[in-house]
Image (tube, grey):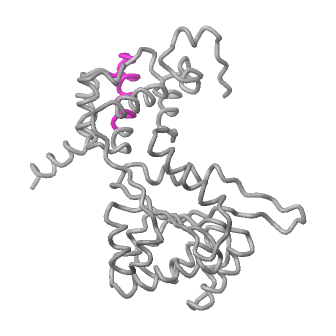
Amino acid sequence: MTMTQDPDESRLYPHLGDAARAVIDAGLEARIRFIKETHWIGYAQADLILARMKELLDAPRVDRPECLVILGDTNNGKTSILQRFANSQVRIERGDGSGSEWPVVTIQAPPVADEKRLYTAILHRVGGLGASLRTRSALFTATITTLSGIGTRMLVIDEIHHLISGSTNQHRICLNALKYLANELRLSIVVAGISDAHYSLGVIDPQLENRFKPMQLPRWIDGVNFRRLLASIEMILPLKKPSILQRPVMAKRLAILSDGKIGELLTILVAATVEAIRSGKECIDEGVITQIQDIAPAYRRRTLRDDL
């Protein structure tokens, strides 16, 4: 269904961005579906990381390309940034009809450190025949040939800590494979993982720690930047009344409830928005937060302790 926007709605709902304003007069369920969809929330550190990834992608190909490791706690925005970048890099159809170029290939690291699974994940992502290949040598050759053939300039791997868990020998094999891919194909590798991933890379191979420059996604604390983030988020919440989430008391409460993680913050605010819509309150206040706060990390931990 196509939503049309009344020119006067920008004056009626000045607290909303265009996307939320376009659905504000839709039915309850339509608004709830809207807020449960994935929405990009920009902020300064995310913009810096995206700019650095674009810089690496556009850099001339060299023998030892620079790489990047994005570090942060679980549910603090790493995957969203990688997906945002991947979505901005469209595949390019070749004029000779030989297929398309994939400048950026994005995968999730296999759940355990296993070289064959790593190659299979890459080939599966680009529509290769990884599942039909049995030997490490065949998978390795297919990966090199495929990525070279589709013009890949950047390999992005989420959850890199999976590749540095398990036996040290398997770690080293997988990381040597990544280093070889980077050198042989002259492509940059961007990985994301939990905060100690960069240290683990250095323990396994000091050269990799030097090659992969870290960028951090620290936890949020209540302050100017956090309140700007809350103001940005409020613009996508399809509520008819302003919540003013950046109010000091509310901001402090949300920072505590979310453990300073943007993923947890969004989970809380989506649940609060649904509650505000269904209850007819049409804004998020302290009472709405109290209604849904049991989904917050601090309350989940308290419940677990009580159960034990």
| Vertical order, 264 against 167 (above or below) | above
Task: Name which residue lies at 36% across and 55% down.
Answer: 72
Of helix, strand and loop, which mostly describes the magenta segment? helix
- Quadrant of the rendered structure where residue 113 is? bottom left
Place of residue 106 in the rendered image (x, y in percent of width and height, measured from the top left): 57, 63
Viewer-proximal residue among 4 and 243: 243
The residue depicted at 60 percent of the width and 55 percent of the height is 55
Count how many numbered circles sit on residues in the image. Answer: 0
Question: Left or right of 131: which side holds 159?
Answer: left
The verdict on residue 275 being magenta is: yes
Q: Image point 36% across, 80% down: which residue? A: 204
Q: Nearer the viewer, residue 254 or 3?
A: 254
Q: Is residue 166 above or below residue 73?
A: below
Q: Position of residue 294 (x, y in %)?
A: 23, 38
Determine if the magenta segment contains residue 165.
Answer: no
Q: Tell whether 55 sits left or right of 301.
A: right
Q: Position of residue 22 (x, y in %)?
A: 59, 22
Identify the residue at the far right of this view. Answer: 96
Quarter residue 163 falls in? bottom left
Q: Is residue 22 above or below residue 33?
A: above
Q: Nearer the viewer, residue 188 or 32?
A: 188
Which quadrant would the N terminus be assigned to in this image?
A: top right
What's drawn in magenta, residue-wise?
268-284
Looking at the figure, which quarter contains the C terminus? Answer: bottom left
Task: Residue 86 in the image: state x and y as whole percent.
Answer: 60, 54
Q: Residue at x 44, y 75 (%)?
A: 208
**97 lies above or below 297:** below
